[in-house]
Image (spheres, rainbow, N blue to C red):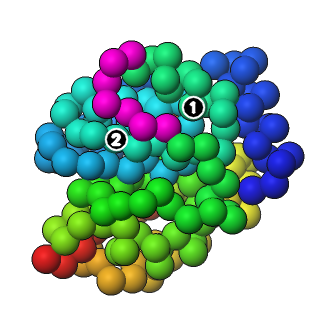
Amino acid sequence: MSTADREKWDTRYRTQGAESKAPSAFLRSLDLRQSGRALDVAGGAGRNAIWLAQRGLDVTLVDISREGLALARAAAGDLPLSLVCADLESEPLPAGPFDLIISFNFLRRELFAAFPGSLSPGGLLVYQQPTMSNLQRHPRPPAAFLLADGELPGLLQGLEMVSYQEGWFADGDEPGEARHQARLVARKPR
């Protein structure tokens, strides 16, 4: 991302605050471990990272926005949450290995090559991203930030698919109508 992108997100968090404090319904629906290290990729104000930390994981939240990370720090209190301000278009993922990596609504296809090296053996990747079909009902996010329909499984490298869903989901993550999303859980072989 550019400096302009960082400024855009900082301004958004400064003026609007956290988009939501509730963790993703998809994330909550999974039977995830309650110990180990987790990485929240582009996690903004930390709604998912904080939920994971509340469950007992040692969480690292990486995001480009200092304002978003400040909101996460304030909301996390004494929870085990490490904050990393980084531009993932030009900087690597924080050092692993992690037992769990989550990425919600952040599309950087090149990260799929990095995920296996950042996961511990048996570690999970949980990923959710809107697809092009979302444009049928919603003008945002624009096409540049959407997966092609059916694209997500083909991006996996070095991981085994545990589950994959693609369709219209109205689960409270976004206000309003259902969003067309691809959702994936994958595991690094032991």
Q: Is residue 65 above or below residue 122?
A: above
Which of the image's four quarters has the C terminus?
Answer: bottom left
Q: Position of residue 54 (x, y in %)?
A: 25, 27
Q: Is residue 53 above or below residue 90?
A: above
Residue at horizontal 53%, vertical 43%? 84
Q: Quadrant of the N terminus?
A: bottom right
Q: Is residue 175 visible?
A: no
> Can residue 182 be seen from the camera position used here?
yes
Q: Residue furthest right?
A: 4
Q: Position of residue 138 (x, y in %)?
A: 67, 45
Check disc 1 and give the amino acid type. Leu
x and y percent of residue 172 in the render? 42, 31
Give x and y (percent) for residue 3: 83, 48
Residue matched to label 2? 59
Range of residues picked out in magenta:
77-83
**Magenta stretch encompasses residue 81:** yes
The correct choice, above or below, for 63 with respect to 48 in the image is below
> Callout 2: helix, strand or loop?
strand
Which residue occupies 57% across, 31% down? 69
- Give whichever of 141, 64 is nearer the camera: 64
- Residue 69, numbered circle: 1
Label 1: few (<14), some or many (≥20) within 10 Å?
Answer: many
**Residue in front for this viewpoint, 112 or 86:** 86
In this picture, residue 81 sits left or right of residue 72: left
Residue 77 vertical position relative to residue 86 in the rendered view, above or below: above
Question: Which element carries disc 1, helix, strand or loop?
Answer: helix
Disc nearer the start of the sequence (1/2): 2
Q: Amino acid at mark 2?
A: Val
**Whole-number angstrom distance, CA of label 1 to CA of label 2:** 13 Å
